[in-house]
Image (cartoon, rainbow, N blue to C red):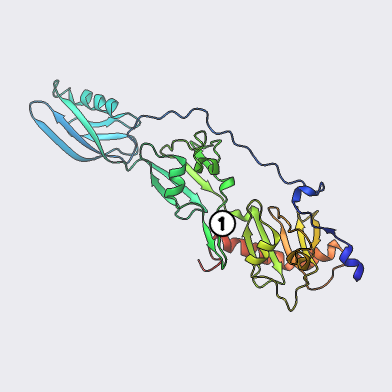
Amino acid sequence: MGCARNHYTQAPTTPQDDPAFSAPEPVVLKGLESDPPEALKLLAGDVIKLTTVSAKTQIFNGLIVDELGMLHVPLAGDIKVGGMTLSQAETAVERGLRQYDRFVRANLVITRLDGHWAVAVGAVTKPGRVRVRPGLRVADLVAEAGGPLMGQSQLMPTLLGDMDLARLVRNGETLPVDLPLAVQGDPRHNINIRPGDQLYVPPVTGRLIMVLGEVNRQTPIAFRQGIRLTEALAHAGGLVMSRADRHDIRIIRGPLREPLVYTTNFKALTSGEATDVELAPGDIVYVTKSWYASTADVLNSLSQVLSLANSFAILAVAGAIGGR
């Protein structure tokens, strides 16, 4: 069994150090070169105050633009105003009223922007509708949604919403906007939010690191650039010292149909005799309690805990990990 220890490649310090592993190429989003502001327009659901001025002044409060974009104006009836600016809508209302009073002037004021909404969904802290006011940008929408969903661990909050894969959808099309760059204030990405925009933040299930085996808490951890093995093990509450083999920590990397299996000596790491290992998205850290003769044996031993890992991932996204 002593040969088994040397059967696996020592884990590289960084994933890029092993030419056999090729991480997926990140998608680079270019942002929008031009994002001119738009005039405020009347939308279905907006609440209007109409003032008519002629021989006498009349005020009509609480008029609502309906789903067809129509505004019911006393005497004139239904007038199409949806999608118009206030000036355009006033002209339309005056045109409808002048068949009864050719000197009438109309003034419209939006008292509630109930038709101006964007939506934040997915793994955000406060999913739901956000009122779109003039000047609202992507970073503001993210802030209004409370940011990406976080789970609590005993050490530190764990990110459960994947901002790198978050997308902004407008009129059924995904805009080339990078959410982390938008939050940092990049003007090509921190664009104006329009009514009807939808922000989707996916869960981190595709970028989780699973820590399994002889640890105190088998747990998923959200990947972030630069996370290392010792940190992942600390998140899991450390090794079960009475059972864990500190000389043989396995790292399973890449697709499970053709995985790369590495080994590393945790005792050497903690004593400063070896370099800590940087992890990759999707890595499975498995703390062994005995030697395995082959990669197949490792994966067979993992088959049951992998199903457990998937369950943990679902719980993590729901906010159940760490007592949320």
Residue picked out by circle 1: 160
User: On the rendered structure, is 274 left or right of 206?
Assistant: right
Q: Residue 110, how many percent across, how many down?
A: 26, 37
Res. 303 visible in picture: no
Please name the amino acid that badge 1 sits on: Leu
What residue is at 11 percent from the left and 26 percent from the top?
54
Q: Is residue 29 above or below residue 124?
A: above
Which residue is at 52% across, 33% downward?
Answer: 188
Does dot 1 land on a helix, a strand or a loop? loop
Residue situated furthest front in the rendering: 272
Front-most of residues 252 and 234: 234
The image quarter containing residue 244 is bottom right
> Residue 161: x percent and y percent?
55, 53
Write down the quadrant of residue 249 in the picture.
bottom right
Residue 286 in the image, given as x and y percentages of width and height: 74, 65
In this rendered view, identify the residue nearer to me: 7 or 100.
Answer: 7
* Residue 11 sits in quarter: bottom right
Whether residue 238 sits left or right of residue 181 in the image: it is right
Residue 143 % position (x, y)? 44, 48
